[in-house]
Image (cartoon, rainbow, N blue to C red):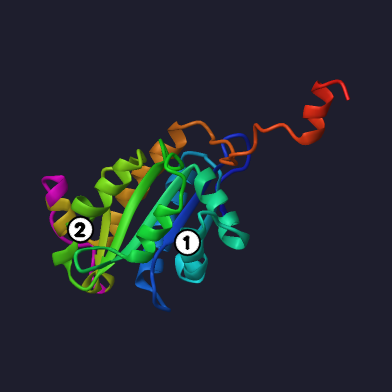
Amino acid sequence: MVAGESGATRRSLVAVSAGLGQPSSTRMLAERLLGGTSDALAEQGVGVDTEIVELRGHAHAIVDAMLTGFASGELDEVLGRVTAADGLILVTPVFTTTYSGLFKSFLDILDHDALRGVPVVLGATGGTARHSLALEYSLRPLLTYLRAEVVTTSVFAATEDWAGTDAGPSPKSHHDAAQTEGLPRRIHRAGRELADRVAANPVRQSGDLFDGTPDFGQMLGQLGH
């Protein structure tokens, strides 16, 4: 999926959904956040390539990577695109007050510095709004530990949010906003914050760890063979 103008300003966005079901409200939230961010970048004249990664389809490969210490096949390609993205949207369901095991396992197989300085917006889904603070005491510290640039607004979508409206008084603070704003407005605000960070940063280079490694022929040439 492509949005915005092409050219030197082009950026890449990857949304990672750790939803386990089909259909998945977690994936739906990831799609909405991706759309909001793409629209905000397009308004700034920044072209963007977008992708959604559903961890559900890579669950077995993620476990294999944890056991063997390296990823292969499609998962290796996914990791390459995630770590090279100019901006990330990370969305997980909340179980027993924290992120899912699949979501944490995916982060565990990333290189420790893979998300360093990468603009990130966080999202979560759950049965009731009582679990919304899990974003702040669970997900945000985790991504801060990984040195990602997490935007101020995180988006939690409870079951009732999907049927809600955007009506209501303007919030007086960020905490009030998180509790009273409708879901579309929260998504719009988070997407704009992520778009501003992505647009302000230079285009990221490939995260391939072996980009700077000379091949065997080059090394022989340096030895005069």
Instruction: Where is residue 108? Give x, y as percent.
Output: 40, 53
Q: Nearer the viewer, residue 218 or 5?
A: 218
Q: Quadrant of the N terminus?
A: bottom right
Q: Which mark is residue 134?
A: 2
Image coords of residue 118 (percent x, y): 42, 40
Q: Is residue 170 visible?
A: no
Q: Tell me: 12 left or right of 24.
A: right
Query: Residue 110's spot in the image, x, y percent?
Result: 46, 49
Indicate yes or no whether the magenta region holds residue 37. Answer: no
Residue 180 shows up from this direction: yes
User: Amino acid type of disc 1?
Assistant: Leu
Looking at the rendering, which quadrant does residue 125 occupy? bottom left
The crowding category of the residue bearing disc 2, from other C-alpha atoms within 10 Å (few below 14, some 14 to 19, many at least 20), is: some
Q: Report the quarter where the C terminus lies.
A: top right
- The residue drawn where x is 67% and y is 33% is 213
In the rendered structure, the answer to whether residue 19 lies left or right of residue 142 reads: right
173 left or right, relative to 27: left
Q: Is residue 166 magenta?
A: yes
* Magenta region, residue range: 163-175
- Residue at mark 1: 67
Closer to us: 68 or 79: 68
SS assignment at label 2: helix
